Image (cartoon, helix red, strand yellow):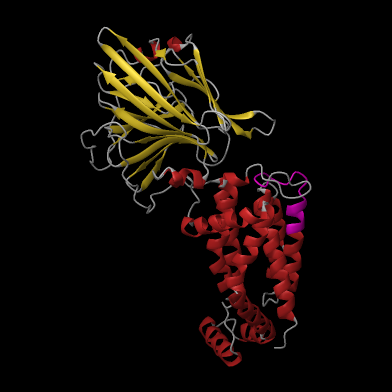
């Protein structure tokens, strides 16, 4: 019984880790903290629609011709990013992050090229769908430069007015923030949509994690990708919409009321847009890294876009503790080591009991073998005798497995934190480990980790028969090959945890029975 349980636990943990890495789960509805209401900076509008979530066909979409090409560039430079707008359509055409690179020294580009759906453009819902992208807008400035030594904030206004048609887009930028205050005023314009734009915010299209549109509605997150089969429409208490990948996002957060959100597929890409009535609208626009603390400061619920998976309730506190350790250690590698020690401390008493139980089980193994041989044709009698043996020698056949079960949420939570926290992207440790978010280039950590697993297994008492013991010895090989492609930060955590386990097992083995 004990040996089968151990095998089940080990295999369960292995399957969970492999599945989480190769097939990341879609973000499922979670109980999130209510998003606080925000005050409109300009005016009070009619109440927002609050119907429950529904899905309905979206108006058929027509391909957009590149008619908005040819406008003049309007550039915005801050210490954090460089953005380029076009006066043709008053749309975003480029967005580069200065603090993040592509591993080749080039800045991360959240908008690499003009997509089929224009970023922060206006889409009408009739035959003139693309008209706003073909209009040449006037602008209050051809460029804006913000810096620590210079201006801390600035405004650029795009406006078009002719034949009674009026569209005004106002952008307010801040030097030390990725957020932009964004408002739209229209006159004689019917209902329209404002999209995030094709792949705006999706830097890595090849990653395993979710990439594409996402929205927060009430307290649930809905995700979509390029496999979207049919258009969908949502109304209700929508907190924000975004395009995201593992580390970055571009998001629109409504300040004034909206009508709903449309999600559809345009060509090969999934798109998302707010559907708006012809009135003034105000937003917070965010295009940058998914830094939890920075997103939380927006006070709009956008921090929920950082997804730590199944055990978020465990992962989030661990993540905050990891950042706390980093603040005074200045190195995420050492912070991971310290976090590993701290997370193991609560399990020490349980692990000690488990190790004692394993030693007792090993001592009664010959008696167990005799009972199995004697009653091999009578399963009921065998079970009765086994139970009596356990009671006589005061052993618990599952006592050695309980700590494994208890640690599974911590293992999975830390796995997700170390895989998804952008704070580890580009974070060095020591020597050849220059980026804790990617695999060890020389595979030193996973190989050493596998060796520690072998040593720990050899030190651990077991009541398994020789065949099953040999099968268990395959686990270090499986884990080593699995961890070859895992991030260095995750392998470092597992290695340190193994070393601590070896030290504790060494101490337990020296204790009298």
Question: Which of 200 and 138 lies nearest the eye of the viewer?
Answer: 138
Q: Name which residue lies at 58% across and 76% down.
A: 350
Q: Where is residue 167 in the image (x, y as percent from the top left)?
A: 32, 17
Q: In this view, does 192 lie above or below 328?
A: above
Task: State left or right for residue 409 relative to residue 58.
Answer: right
Q: Position of residue 80 (x, y in %)?
A: 56, 33
Location of residue 512 by image quarter: bottom right
Q: Is residue 23 visible?
A: yes
Q: Name which residue lies at 63% across and 43% down.
A: 425
Q: How many labels does the image show?
A: 0
Q: Where is residue 468 in the image (x, y as percent from the top left)?
A: 68, 69
For the magenta stretch, what is the residue range? 436-449
Spot the residue most to the top.
Answer: 163
Q: In this view, does 155 lie above or below 312?
A: above
Q: Where is residue 479 in the image (x, y as percent from the top left)?
A: 68, 56
Q: Name which residue lies at 75% across and 63% down.
A: 452
Quadrant for the N terminus, please: bottom right
Q: Is residue 159 above or below residue 42?
A: above
Is 445 magenta? The answer is yes
């Amino acid at each position: 019984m004990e040996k089968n349980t151990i095998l089940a636990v080990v295999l369960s943990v292995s399957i969970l880790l492999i599945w989480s890495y190769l097939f990341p789960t879609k973000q499922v509805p979670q109980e999130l903290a209510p998003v606080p209401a925000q005050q409109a900076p300009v005016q009070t509008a009619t109440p927002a629609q609050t119907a429950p979530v529904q899905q309905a066909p979206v108006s058929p979409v027509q391909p957009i011709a590149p008619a908005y090409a040819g406008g003049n560039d309007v550039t915005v430079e801050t210490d954090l990013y460089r953005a380029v707008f076009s006066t043709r359509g008053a749309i975003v055409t480029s967005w580069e992050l200065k603090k993040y690179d592509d591993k080749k020294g080039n800045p991360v580009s959240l908008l690499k090229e003009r997509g089929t759906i224009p970023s922060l453009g206006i889409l009408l819902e009739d035959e003139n769908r693309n008209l706003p992208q073909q209009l040449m807008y006037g602008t209050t400035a051809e460029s804006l430069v913000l810096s620590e030594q210079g201006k801390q904030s600035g405004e650029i206004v795009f406006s078009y007015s002719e034949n009674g048609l009026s569209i005004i887009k106002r952008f307010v930028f801040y030097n030390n923030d990725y957020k932009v205050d964004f408002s739209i005023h229209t006159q004689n314009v019917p209902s329209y949509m404002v999209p995030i734009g094709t792949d705006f915010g999706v830097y890595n299209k090849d990653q395993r994690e979710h990439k594409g549109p996402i929205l927060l509605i009430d307290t649930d997150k809905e995700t979509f990708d390029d496999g979207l089969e049919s258009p969908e429409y949502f109304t209700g208490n929508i907190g924000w919409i975004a395009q995201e990948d593992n580390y970055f996002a571009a998001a629109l957060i409504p300040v004034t009321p909206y009508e709903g959100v449309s999600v559809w597929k345009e060509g090969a890409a999934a798109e998302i847009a707010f559907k708006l009535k012809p009135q003034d609208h105000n937003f917070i626009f965010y295009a940058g890294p998914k830094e939890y603390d920075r997103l939380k400061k927006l006070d709009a619920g956008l921090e929920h876009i950082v997804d730590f998976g199944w055990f978020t309730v465990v992962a989030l506190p661990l993540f905050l503790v990891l950042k706390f350790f980093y603040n005074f250690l200045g190195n995420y590698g050492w912070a991971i080591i310290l976090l590993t020690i701290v997370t193991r401390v609560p399990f020490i008493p349980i692990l000690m009991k488990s190790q004692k139980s394993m030693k007792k089980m090993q001592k009664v193994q010959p008696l167990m073998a005799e009972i199995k041989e004697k009653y091999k044709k009578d399963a009921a009698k065998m079970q009765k005798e086994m139970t009596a043996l356990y009671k006589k020698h005061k052993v618990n056949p599952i006592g050695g497995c309980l700590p494994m079960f208890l640690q599974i949420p911590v293992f999975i939570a830390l796995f997700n934190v170390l895989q998804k926290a952008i704070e580890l992207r580009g974070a060095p440790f020591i020597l050849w480990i220059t980026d804790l978010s990617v695999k060890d280039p020389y595979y030193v950590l996973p190989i050493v980790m596998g060796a520690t697993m072998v040593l720990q297994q050899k030190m651990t008492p077991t009541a398994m028969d020789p065949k099953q013991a040999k099968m268990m010895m395959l686990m270090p090989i499986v884990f080593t090959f699995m961890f070859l492609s895992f991030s260095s930060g995750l392998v470092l955590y597992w290695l340190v945890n193994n070393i601590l386990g070896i030290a504790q097992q060494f101490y337990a083995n020296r204790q009298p029975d």
